[in-house]
Image (cartoon, helix red, strand yellow):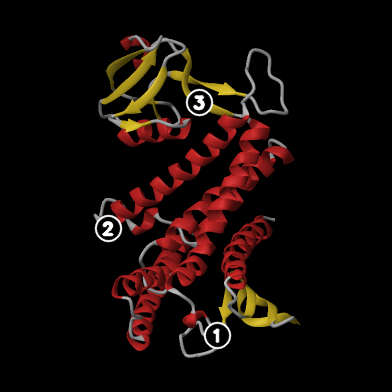
């Protein structure tokens, strides 16, 4: 079942991503020759209008093949003959759709299930929060100068600090207070301060003593959740490049399938609705991560193409097609080598 769920999640994210390129190409009068879901040999294909729609053997990936995508076609409807701005819109539309998918899912999750907030609801005896004087109703505004927008921000910075002292900025009765506090390790291995975060219920649920979330909070929470996972992507990339994060700590498609399977198996025990929420949350996180990863200036990815388009806009003339193609080819080879290393690491971890 976890394989089916994984294929479904990857397929939805890929379809949404490629549909972004597809609709942007159509809106800018670029001919789309093929819209494919999956990679490898064709299983099924059908032509509607000028476009071939195909389903391919391997259910990871996909593509939107446009006329003149390689700049070799002189037709008015070819990608290469469009303005730099039009090409930028088309290339970036895939990632934009990934962000939109994540945003919509987060909106639905928060609207139906509610969320926790950076406000303190309860302080527990015997923990640092109680000892330094944190009170119920306190709102955590920042940790070590890092602004806290949602509860996930707060949890991350506390966990990431380990057992090192951190500085909290707290708003209490309209006044700003600063506290120095050192997290402690809980029985399950998490670093905590010893307080319970406040919660707000969804629009369609009723919990005694808990207020309902409002529409403004729903949209803001969804927006800040996307920013949170974008921030985590950049933090992870920075730590990888600075050798603070090892390859073994990363996951590729194989590792992600295992994570999805573990998430599904754990959540389904609590009921179908809880499992659906967990899988939807994972899909939103993965979609946001794929969106930002695709925009990184890495050859062979959308971000690599955007980088060359920005150079073209600055120079006011295109980069040599052969030189750009060579850079993308080298980038693709490096990405494939990296993907194989990640895959081997994932397999070793599973074994």
Callouts 1 and 3 close, C-beta under 8 Å: no
> In what element is the residue under mark 2?
helix
Find residue 60 and report its image quarter: bottom right
Q: Which is closer to the viewer, label 3 or label 2? A: 3
Spatial distance from mark 3 to mark 2, Cα to Cα? 33 Å
Q: Label 3, secondary structure: give it.
A: strand
Q: Residues within 10 Å of mark 1 (few under 14, many from 20)?
A: some
Which of the 4 quarters of the picture holds residue 42? Answer: bottom right
191 with respect to 103 (left or right): left
> Percent from the top left, x then y, of residue 310?
35, 69
For residue 238, the mark is none
For the point 71% across and 25% down, the residue is 205
Could you tell me how far apart the alpha carbons at marks 1 and 3 are, in whole angstroms? Answer: 53 Å
Above or below 344: residue 2: above
Q: On residue 241, which mark appears?
A: 2
Q: Is residue 189 visible?
A: no
On-image quarter of the N terminus? bottom right
- Direction from residue 175 to residue 214 in the image, left or right: right
For residue 76, which numbered disc appears in the image? 1
- Place of residue 122 in the rendered image (x, y in percent of width and height, measured from the top left): 49, 13
Eye-nearest disc, 1 or 2 = 1
Q: Earlier in the sequence, mark 1 or mark 2?
A: 1
Q: Residue under circle 3?
A: 117
Locate residue 296, reporting x and y percent.
38, 62
Decide if residue 228 is on the left or right side of residue 243: right
Classify mark 3: residues with Cα within 10 Å, few (<14), some (14-19) or many (20+). many
Q: Is residue 110 above or below residue 136?
A: below
> Mark 1 against mark 3, which lies toward the viewer?
1
Q: From mark 1 to mark 2, how far is it between C-alphas?
A: 42 Å
């Amino acid at each position: 079942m976890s394989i089916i769920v994984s294929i479904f999640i990857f397929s939805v994210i890929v379809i949404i991503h490629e549909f972004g390129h597809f609709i942007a190409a159509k809106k800018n009068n670029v001919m789309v020759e093929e819209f494919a879901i999956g990679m490898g040999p064709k299983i099924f294909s059908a032509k509607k209008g000028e476009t071939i729609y195909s389903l391919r053997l391997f259910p990871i990936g996909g593509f939107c093949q446009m006329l003149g995508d390689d700049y070799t076609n002189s037709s008015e409807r070819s990608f290469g003959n469009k303005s730099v701005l039009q090409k930028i819109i088309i290339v970036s539309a895939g990632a934009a759709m990934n962000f939109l998918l994540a945003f919509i899912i987060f909106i639905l999750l928060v609207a139906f299930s509610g969320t926790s907030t950076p406000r303190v609801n309860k302080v527990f005896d015997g923990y640092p929060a109680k000892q330094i004087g944190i009170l119920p109703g306190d709102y955590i505004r920042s940790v070590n100068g890092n602004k806290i927008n949602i509860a996930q921000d707060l949890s991350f910075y506390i966990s990431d600090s380990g057992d090192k002292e951190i500085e909290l900025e707290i708003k209490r009765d309209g006044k700003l207070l600063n506290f120095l506090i050192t997290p402690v390790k809980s029985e399950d291995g998490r670093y905590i301060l010893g307080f319970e975060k406040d919660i707000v219920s969804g629009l369609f649920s009723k919990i005694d003593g808990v207020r309902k979330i409002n529409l403004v909070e729903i949209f803001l929470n969804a927006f800040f959740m996307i920013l949170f996972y974008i921030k985590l992507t950049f933090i992870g990339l920075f730590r990888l490049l600075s050798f603070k994060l090892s390859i073994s700590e990363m996951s590729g498609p194989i590792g992600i399938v295992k994570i999805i399977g573990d998430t599904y198996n754990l959540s389904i025990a609590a009921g179908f609705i809880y499992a659906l929420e967990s899988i939807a949350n994972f899909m939103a996180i993965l979609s946001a991560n794929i969106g930002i990863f695709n925009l990184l200036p890495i050859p062979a990815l959308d971000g690599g193409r955007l980088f060359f388009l920005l150079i073209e806009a600055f120079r006011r003339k295109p980069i040599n097609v052969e030189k750009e193609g060579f850079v993308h080819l080298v980038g693709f080879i490096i990405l494939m080598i990296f993907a194989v290393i990640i895959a081997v690491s994932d397999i070793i971890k599973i074994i």
